[in-house]
Amino acid sequence: MKITGYISNLRENILIAREQGKAIVLIPTMGFLHYGHLAMVEDARKDDEDREKVYIIMSIFVNPLQFGKNEDFDRYPRNLVRDSTLAQEAGVDMLFVPSAKEMYPNGQSLTTINVTQISEILCGSKRPGHFKGVATVVSKLFNIVLPDLAYFGQKDYQQFVVISQVVKDLNIPVQLIAFPTVREHDGLAMSSRNSYLSSEERQQAPILYSSLQEGAVLIAENETNADVIKTKIIDRISKESKGKIEYVEVRNAHNLEQIEKIEGAVVISLAVQFGSTRLIDNIILEV
Ligand code: PAF
């Protein structure tokens, strides 16, 4: 595995891989890798047992543009030594670890990508500017790498919908994969931010997924009222944990519009604060 912090060097290596006929795969991350990230590498490798057909680039960049002033940019966990070992073992071909100066030479980007409407709801209403930062950095990464395929975790489902909209609106020729959320043995969605949880918070956090599953069971039993599902989930989390609910929403999975009746592709998503840690999770159902 090669490691570079430089766009020019990355592009030189991509050119060689392209000349060898390889498909270029991008897995953007903010590092502090866990199995949720590594499973995407495994998936990209799955049809490529001789490791010859795809060229996998993983980026690690804690993007300042997507953090609000009082958010966790400074304390976001970073461990490049550990990350590079894990990435290499998983089969990454090139690790791209740019500095903020390499990505934003003037300290900022005068050009930003703002996806209206879907960036302003759910997590976006609590984190103004967050999705603009995400859409901008991901668009930059797409332009730097020109990937054929890019992977994003389904845990950040709104992020996936926002990026899909960017790709559609700006005609970016990349195929996006929403990779299923990888979970701990007790159901908690893997996240670099889980490392912030105290042991009591960690014990309580699986309630998020089990309450989402309870919602899914009710829907399977023919409950079609979105408010009933929301209320059940809110009640369960409030009763069984000290988590402070930011939102629980049942929405159309394609455009994130609010729905009253559950039908078609539906996403149940939630954000809950455990102490100083904000956790998100979701499930997608086809009804
Ligand atoms: O999901 C993440 O880790 C980040 O939001 C991403 C997509 C790497 C952009 O910084």
Image (spheres, helix red, strand yellow):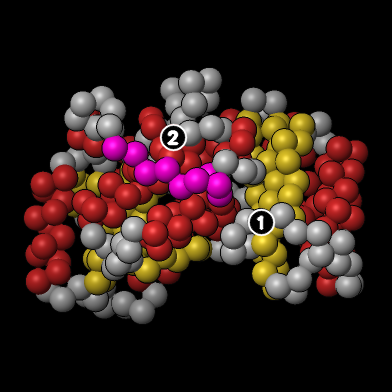
| Residue 205 in the figure: left or right of residue 33 | right
- The amino acid pointed to by label 2 is Gln
* Residue 199 in view here: no
Disc 1: which residue = 257
Residue 44 vs residue 257: left or right?
Answer: left
Q: In x, y percent, where is residue 190? A: 58, 49
Q: Nearer the viewer, residue 10 or 225?
A: 225
The residue closer to the viewer here, 192 or 286, is: 286
Q: Is mark 2 within 8 Å of ligand 1?
A: yes
Residue 246 can be seen in this image: yes
- What x and y, as percent, mark residue 89? 34, 57
What is the magenta segment's predominant secondary structure? loop
Which image quadrant is residue 88 in?
bottom left
Residue found at x 83% / y 72%? 220
| Front: mark 2 or 1 | 1
Q: Is residue 116 magenta?
A: yes
Instruction: Inspect the image, locate mark 1, and give the three-letter code of the amino acid beneath it.
Output: Glu
Residue drawn at (77%, 32%) of the image: 244
Q: Which residue is mark 2?
A: 66
CA–CA distance between discs 2 and 1? 23 Å
State which quadrant residue 23 falls in. Answer: bottom left
- The region drawn magenta spans 111-119
Name the residue located 46 percent from the left edge and 30 percent from the top edge: 67
Q: Position of residue 61 (x, y in %)?
A: 34, 39
Please state which of residues 140 and 86 is positioned toward the viewer in this rendering: 140
Quarter of the image for the C terminus: give it.
Answer: bottom right
Q: Is residue 179 inside the magenta stretch?
A: no
From the image, which quarter does the N terminus lie in?
bottom left
**Residue ID at (29%, 37%):** 111
